[in-house]
Structures are given as structure tokens and as C-alpha cells.
Image (cartoon, grey):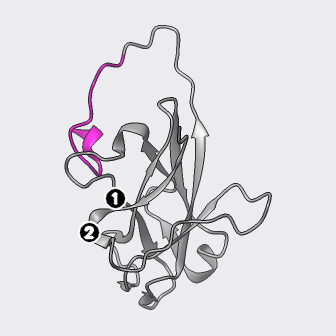
Amino acid sequence: MPKRGFEIVKEYKDKNIHLPVRKTKYAAGYDVEAAEDVIIPAYKFGTKPTLIPTGLKAYCGEDEYFMLVNRSSGPKKGLVMANSIGIVDYDYYNNESNEGHFYFQYFNFSGQDLEIKKGDTIGQVIFQKYLTVDNDNAEGIRTGGFGSTDK
């Protein structure tokens, strides 16, 4: 029985998307590539973060989640994740609004527009287990995709 992994979302099945891989034996993160070309504009007050599609969804255990994290080279290029770190819950996988497609969202503080090309490594995914407290009684069910637990 599969424990955790990546799949390509339907919309990107025929677009030569690569599944994430760890580049070294002891790396914690799986390197994720951009699914298409994207321009991230230089930051100005009021600029919204740019969403970079991955063409991917990921599955994990019910007591797990995965983190979307910046690469160590990201800040050198001026890239800062808008939410510092992305947390993606177990029930985001195959959700009804976007199939579980996850994106990286960045601000660009380099002073000039930054072009991300399809296939450029844009971040990493790290899988983790989580713990709950003794009196936890969460029973809600996700009904949407990106940002849906804010509703």
C-alpha cells in the first residue's frame, strides 16, 4: 500500500512534468519544478504574491502533512515565499475544487522582474507527521482547494 508520494494532476498530464526527487541520499526535501513559464514582478507595495503552478498533487498518511519550503538559493535571487512556509494537509489531495494541485507563492525582492522557466526548481516538499492534543475533536471536512480552511 503506498504511503506518500506525488502524482501529476489531470490538467498537466501531457505537459512533460517531472515528479520531484531528492538530489542527495540525506536530503530532507524533494525538489519541485515549475510546470510553466512565469514572470514574478519586482515587489512594490500592494503587490500580491505570484502563484507558480507545479502540475502536481501529493498524498500522505492521515497523520501527516507536507511543507512547501523555499530553496536556500531562493533569497539570493530575491525570492521569498509569501507565507514563509506552506502547510498542505492530508485532505488537500484530490479535493473537489482543484484535485489537490499545489502551488508555490513568491514575492520577488530583487528589484527587477524575475523569469521562472518551466523545469526550473522552485522549491522543496518535506513530508512530516503531526501530533494532536488529548481533547482534540476536529470533525470538519475539506470542501475546497487553496485556502479553503479559512472559510
- At 61% from the left edge and 61% from the top edge, which residue is drawn? 30
Q: Is residue 3 above or below residue 103?
A: above
Assess whether residue 14 is covered by the magenta stretch: no
Residue placed furthest toward the top: 135
Which of the labelled discs sits on residue 21, or is there none? none
Three-letter amino acid code at disc 2?
Answer: Glu
Q: Please tell me which of labels 1 and 2 falls first in the chain.
A: 2
Q: Is residue 90 above or below residue 70?
A: above
Q: Residues within 10 Å of mark 1 (few under 14, many from 20)?
A: many
**Quadrant housing residue 26:** bottom right
**Quadrant housing residue 104:** bottom left
Q: Position of residue 23 (x, y in %)?
A: 71, 69
Q: Is residue 46 visible?
A: no
Three-letter amino acid code at disc 1?
Answer: His
Say if mark 1 contacts mark 2, CB within 8 Å. Answer: yes
Which of the labelled discs sits on residue 101, or is there none? 1
Q: Position of residue 20 (x, y in %)?
A: 55, 65
- At 46% from the left edge and 8% from the top edge, which residue is drawn? 135
Assess whether residue 150 is covered by the magenta stretch: yes
Q: What residue range appears in magenta?
A: 138-151
Q: Is residue 106 visible?
A: yes
Of marks 1 and 2, the one in the foreground: 2
- At 27% from the left edge and 45% from the top edge, which residue is drawn? 95
Residue nearer the viewer, 50 or 31: 31
Which of the labelled discs sits on residue 11, or is there none? 2
Q: Position of residue 25 (x, y in %)?
A: 79, 61
Residue placed furthest toward the front: 1
Q: Position of residue 96 (x, y in %)?
A: 20, 46
Q: Secondary structure at mark 2?
A: helix
Magenta span main SS = loop
103 relative position to 130: left or right: left
